[in-house]
Image: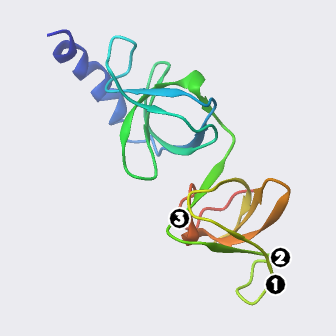
Amino acid sequence: MMVLWAWPIWAAEEKAENFQGYYASLRYDEVNMRNGPGKRFMVEWTYHRRSLPVRVTAVHEQWRRIRDYEGTEGWVHQAMLSSQRTVLVMHRRQALRWKPHDDAPVVAYVAPLVVGFLDECDVDWCRLSFDDTQGYMRQNQFWGADKAESLE
């Protein structure tokens, strides 16, 4: 009964017309995702990967509803998130290039599901960092930035 009573309170906030959502990353090696915005809600999933990128889709007080790269959604406390932008390489090994051009020399190949740091983006390309290696990758080759997002 308490869950039914609480639902309309945070449901109204998450549907705010002007909330666009944003990307963040997990701050710690262990982050609990709950089925509602509060400690009284059950833990449905525990992430074990610091810096994993997530999309914040709603806000309720100190709680953030997040979606991960697989589409899993749930609530985490804001203290569990970092504003550090990260990306997750998707599907297959991707080339990290010296310059933002398809014919630029390859600096490294990055395996699927490797997390990197997002430095900047233009319409098609982003500069990323993986450990000590930096280079450019097309936005459609990783998860963690909106299509055609510009970031400086």
For the C terminus, give its image quadrant.
bottom right
- Mark 3 — residue? 90
Q: Residue 124, can we see it?
A: no
Disc 3 to disc 2, C-alpha distance: 20 Å
Disc 3 to disc 1, C-alpha distance: 21 Å
Residue depicted at 53% across the width and 64% down the height: 90
Residue 78 spot, x, y in % from top left: 55, 24
Residue depicted at 75% across the width and 78% down the height: 100
Q: Is residue 82 above or below residue 52?
A: above
Residue 69 falls left or right of residue 3:
right
- Mark 1 — residue? 105
- Mark 2 — residue? 98
Foreground of the two, 140 or 150: 140
Determine crowd level at label 2: few under 14, some 14-19, many 20+ residues with C-alpha closer than 10 A. Answer: some
Image quadrant where residue 17 sits: top left
At label 2, the amino acid type is Trp
Residue depicted at 65% across the width and 49% down the height: 86
Q: Residue 14, can we see it?
A: yes
At label 1, the amino acid type is Pro
At label 3, the amino acid type is Met
Residue at the far left in the pictured view: 1
